[in-house]
Image (tube, helix red, strand yellow):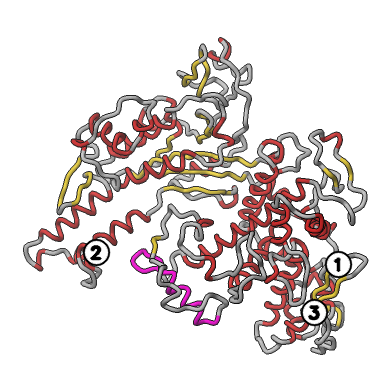
C-alpha cells in the first residue's frame, strides 16, 4: 500500500486557511490575521466528498500558549491522521463534523443484519480512506475476493467500488488495534505509578487526581468508587488487559465505549481517552505508516520474533534445585508427542507454554510449597496430573533428598535454598532474637519498614515483592532492539539468525530414509520427532542436516545452543547456561519478509494465517521498528510535505522552519 495515493485531505483544512505561505521571506514577519476565524468548522466537497476541517478557531484560541508551535504541529498531524484512518468515534471528530467514524464503520461491518443504508456508510468510509485498500505488487487497487489469484480484478472506479473482504478486515483490524493500544497506554500510565502503595494500585486515588486536575473523567465521590478495590498489578496482567483484568474501570474515563452502545446515549460524557489517549495513538500510527510507505525494508528485514523465555536462576551456593528443575522442564516440553496435525501448535492462538513457564517460575522461586508427605505420587507420564507443580517437586525431592528440602519455621512452610526459603529463614532469625540488640538492623528495616508496619505485614510485603520479580520475557522484538537476557548476549545472537524460522510443514509418515535423518519426504531439519511405525517418537540423535539454531518439538519451536548444558543428552540443547541462570527460549513467530507481504505472496500470513493475523503482526512489528531510530522526526517531515502548509503566526513559522528546514527549500 502507498500513501502516495492519499488525497491531500487536510491541506487547506489544517493550515491552509491561516495566512502567508511557507515559501514567504524569512525576514518578513508572518502576521497573525485569522480572517476567517468565524468560518464553518468543516466543509464537504460535494463532488469529491473530501472533508476539510477548519481548525483556525482552535489555534487562534490558543495563541496565548507558549507551547503553541509544538501543539499546533500535534493538532495538524492528528487531524491529518484522522483523514488517513478515519476519526476513532464521534467524540474524536472536530466540532460539527458529521462524518462516519471508524467505530461506526466497524460496528456495521460486524453486524449480521446491516441495512442497505448502513452498508453504504461502510463502503463510503472505506472509499474515503485509502489506507484500507488492497493493492497488488504493481500498486494497483484490486479486489481479491476470489480464491483464485488469477481472477483478481483491478478496481476501475475508486468512487463507487464495493470494498472487498480484505479491505473490510483491514479496517476492523485497525479498530481492534486502536482498542488494544488504548488499554496499553492506560496500563503504562498506572503501572508503577505514585498511586501504587505496598504493591497495590489504588484506582480511586488515580481517578481522584484526574478529576481534581480538570480532566474529563467521572466525577470523583466516595460513592462512585465504593466498590473499587486496590489490586496488584503484576506480571500476570498483560498490558492490554488493564480493563478486562479489572485494574481500571473504562467507564470512568470514556462514555459509550462499547461497540454496541449508542454513542449519543446518556447525559454524562467522560472523554479522557478521546482527549488524552487517542491523539497519541494516531500520532504513532502515522509514524508506522511512514515506515510502511518509505522504509518498508526496515520492517520486512527487521527479523521480528515473538518469543517466550523463562529464566531459572541458580542459587549462589547450592543450585541443584535449578539443575534438576530445568531438566524436568525439558522433559515436560518433550512430553507430548504430536497427534493428528503434527505442527498443531504453530497455529494455536493460546500458547500452552506460557502457563508452563509461569508454573516453573513459581517453583523456581520456591513460591509453590507442598509437604512431600502429603503428596500422592502420579506415575503415568501421559497424565496431566503428572506435570502438576506438587508432582514435579515431589519427584525432584525423591531423586535427591537435599533438593527442594521441605521445612517449616514461624508457621511458614518453605523449601531450603530457594529465594522464598531465604525470606522465611530471615524472618525466623528476626523473630527469634531474644533482645533488641541481637536484631540485625537490615532485618528490622526489612520486616517493619523501619518500624512503620508489623513484622507480619512486612513479611507479606516482602513475599509480594518476590512474586513481582519477573523471570519470564515475552512479546515481539526486532533485531535492533533485541531482548537483553543472558549475560553473554548469546540468546539475542542466536534469536536473530536468518535460519531462525517456524514454517508450517506437511507431516508425512516416517520412512527408513527419514529415520536415517537425511531429511527427505517432507521432514524438516528442525523436527525432533519422527513417526516410526505409526508412533511419534523423539529422534535418538541429531540429524546431520539439523538446523543449527532452532528445533521443532511437537509443533513448538525452541532456540538451540551448541554444547548441551551439564553434559546432558542432545535434547537438552534448548537450554542455555550463562553461569548464573538457565534459559529456555520459545520462538512463537519469526516474521520473515515473505510472511509480511500482501496476499499475492504464497507464503504471506494473509494466506497461511489469515488477513487479521497479518494485520496484527504488521502492527506489532512496525511499532517495534518505530522505536529503533529517528523515524518519528522523519515521519513528521514526510507528512508535512504532503500538505501545502501556510502560516498564521510568527512563532509557528519559526518553529516549523527551525525543525523542518527541508520544507522551505
Q: Residue 457 shows which numbered tag? A: 2
Q: Residues within 10 Å of mark 1 (few under 14, many from 20)?
A: some
Residue 3 in view, yes or no: no
Identify the secondary structure beneath mark 2.
helix
Query: From this viewpoint, is residue 629 visible?
Result: yes
Closer to the chain start, of discs 3 and 2, is 3
Residue 207: say if magenta: yes
Point out residue 7 in the picture as x, y percentages from the top left corner: 85, 63
Q: Which residues are magenta?
A: 196-214
| Element type where label 1 sits in the image | loop
User: Looking at the image, which residue is at 56% across and 10% down?
Assistant: 512
Q: Would you name the residue on which mark 3 appears?
A: 41
* x and y percentages locating residue 510 in the rendered image: 56, 15
**Label 3: how many Cα within 10 Å (few below 14, some 14–19, many 20+):** some
Q: Quadrant of residue 374?
A: top left
Disc 3 versus disc 1: distance between alpha carbons? 14 Å
Compared to residue 571, the image places residue 191 above or below, namely: below
Q: Which is more N-terminal, label 2 or label 1? A: 1
Q: What residue is at 18 percent from the left and 57 percent from the top?
A: 427
Q: Position of residue 619 (x, y in %)?
A: 65, 52
Q: Is residue 636 left or right of residue 339?
A: right
**Does the CB distance between marks 3 and 1 fall below 8 Å?**
no
Residue nearest the observer in this picture, 245 or 558:
245
For mark 3, give the secondary structure.
loop
Residue pointed to by mark 1:
50
242 inside magenta stretch: no
Amino acid at each position: 500500500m502507498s500513501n502516495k495515493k492519499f488525497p491531500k485531505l487536510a491541506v487547506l483544512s489544517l493550515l491552509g486557511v491561516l495566512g502567508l505561505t511557507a515559501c514567504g521571506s524569512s525576514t518578513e514577519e508572518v502576521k497573525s490575521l485569522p480572517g476567517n476565524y468565524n468560518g464553518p468548522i468543516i466543509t464537504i466537497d460535494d463532488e469529491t466528498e473530501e472533508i476539510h476541517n477548519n481548525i483556525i478557531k482552535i489555534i487562534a484560541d490558543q495563541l496565548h500558549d507558549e507551547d503553541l508551535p509544538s501543539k499546533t504541529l500535534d493538532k495538524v498531524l492528528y487531524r491529518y491522521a484522522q483523514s488517513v484512518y478515519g476519526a476513532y468515534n464521534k467524540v474524536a471528530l472536530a466540532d460539527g463534523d458529521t462524518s462516519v467514524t471508524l467505530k461506526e464503520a466497524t460496528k456495521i461491518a460486524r453486524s449480521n443484519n446491516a441495512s442497505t443504508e448502513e452498508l453504504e456508510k461502510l463502503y463510503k468510509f472505506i472509499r474515503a480512506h485509502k489506507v484500507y485498500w488492497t493493492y497488488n505488487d504493481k500498486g494497483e487497487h484490486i479486489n481479491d475476493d476470489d480464491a483464485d489469484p488469477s481472477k483478481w480484478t483491478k478496481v476501475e472506479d475508486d468512487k463507487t467500488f464495493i470494498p472487498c473482504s480484505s479491505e473490510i478486515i483491514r479496517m476492523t483490524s485497525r479498530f481492534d488495534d486502536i482498542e488494544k493500544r488504548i488499554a496499553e497506554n492506560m496500563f503504562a500510565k498506572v503501572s508503577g505509578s505514585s498511586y501504587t502503595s505496598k504493591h497495590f494500585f489504588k484506582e480511586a486515588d488515580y481517578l481522584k487526581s484526574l478529576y481534581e486536575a480538570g480532566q474529563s473523567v467521572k466525577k470523583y465521590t466516595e460513592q462512585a468508587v465504593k466498590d473499587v478495590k486496590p489490586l496488584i498489578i503484576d506480571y500476570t496482567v498483560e498490558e492490554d488487559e488493564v480493563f478486562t483484568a479489572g485494574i481500571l474501570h473504562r467507564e470512568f474515563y470514556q462514555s459509550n465505549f462499547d461497540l454496541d452502545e449508542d454513542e449519543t446515549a446518556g447525559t454524562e460524557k467522560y472523554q479522557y481517552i478521546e482527549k488524552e489517549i487517542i491523539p497519541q495513538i494516531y500520532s504513532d500510527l502515522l509514524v508506522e505508516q511512514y515506515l510502511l510507505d518509505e522504509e518498508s525494508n526496515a520492517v520486512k528485514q527487521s527479523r521480528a520474533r515473538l518469543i517466550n523465555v523463562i529464566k531459572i536462576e541458580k542459587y549462589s551456593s547450592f543450585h541443584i534445585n535449578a539443575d534438576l528443575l530445568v531438566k524436568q522442564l525439558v522433559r515436560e516440553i518433550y512430553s507430548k508427542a504430536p497427534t493428528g496435525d503434527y505442527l498443531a501448535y504453530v497455529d494455536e492462538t493460546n500458547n500452552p507454554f506460557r502457563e508452563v513457564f509461569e508454573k516453573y517460575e513459581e517453583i523456581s522461586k520456591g513460591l509453590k510449597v507442598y509437604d512431600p508427605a502429603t503428596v500422592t505420587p502420579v506415575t503415568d507420564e501421559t497424565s496431566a496430573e503428572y506435570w502438576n507443580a506438587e508432582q514435579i517437586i515431589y519427584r525432584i525431592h525423591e531423586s535427591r533428598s537435599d533438593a527442594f528440602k521441605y521445612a517449616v519455621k514461624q508457621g511458614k512452610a518453605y523449601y531450603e535454598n530457594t529465594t522464598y526459603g531465604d525470606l522465611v529463614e530471615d524472618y525466623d532469625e528476626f523473630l527469634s532474637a531474644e533482645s533488641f540488640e541481637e536484631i540485625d538492623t537490615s532485618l528490622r528495616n526489612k520486616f517493619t519498614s523501619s518500624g512503620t508496619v508489623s513484622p507480619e505485614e512486612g513479611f507479606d510485603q516482602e513475599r509480594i515483592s518476590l512474586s513481582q520479580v519477573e523471570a519470564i520475557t515475552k512479546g515481539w522484538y526486532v533485531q535492533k532492539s533485541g531482548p537483553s537476557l543472558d549475560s553473554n548476549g548469546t540468546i539475542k545472537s542466536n534469536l536473530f539468525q536468518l535460519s531462525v524460522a517456524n514454517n508450517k510443514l506437511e507431516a508425512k509418515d516416517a520412512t527408513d530414509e527419514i529415520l536415517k535423518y537425511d531429511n527427505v519426504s517432507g521432514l524438516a531439519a528442525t523436527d525432533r520427532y519422527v513417526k516410526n511405525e505409526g508412533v511419534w517418537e523423539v529422534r535418538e540423535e541429531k540429524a546431520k542436516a539439523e538446523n543449527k539454531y532452532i528445533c521443532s518439538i511437537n509443533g513448538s519451536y525452541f532456540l538451540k545452543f551448541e554444547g548441551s548444558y551439564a553434559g546432558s543428552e542432545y535434547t537438552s540443547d534448548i537450554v542455555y547456561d550463562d553461569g548464573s541462570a538457565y534459559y529456555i527460549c520459545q520462538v512463537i513467530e519469526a516474521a520473515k519478509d515473505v510472511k509480511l507481504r500482501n496476499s499475492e505472496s504464497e507464503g504471506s500470513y494473509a494466506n497461511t494465517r489469515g488477513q487479521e493475523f497479518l494485520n496484527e503482526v504488521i502492527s506489532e512489528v512496525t511499532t517495534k521498528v518505530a522505536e529503533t531510530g529517528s523515524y518519528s522526526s522523519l515521519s513528521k517531515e514526510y507528512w508535512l510535505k504532503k500538505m501545502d502548509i501556510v502560516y498564521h503566526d510568527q512563532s509557528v513559522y519559526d518553529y516549523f522552519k527551525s525543525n523542518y528546514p527541508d520544507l522551505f527549500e
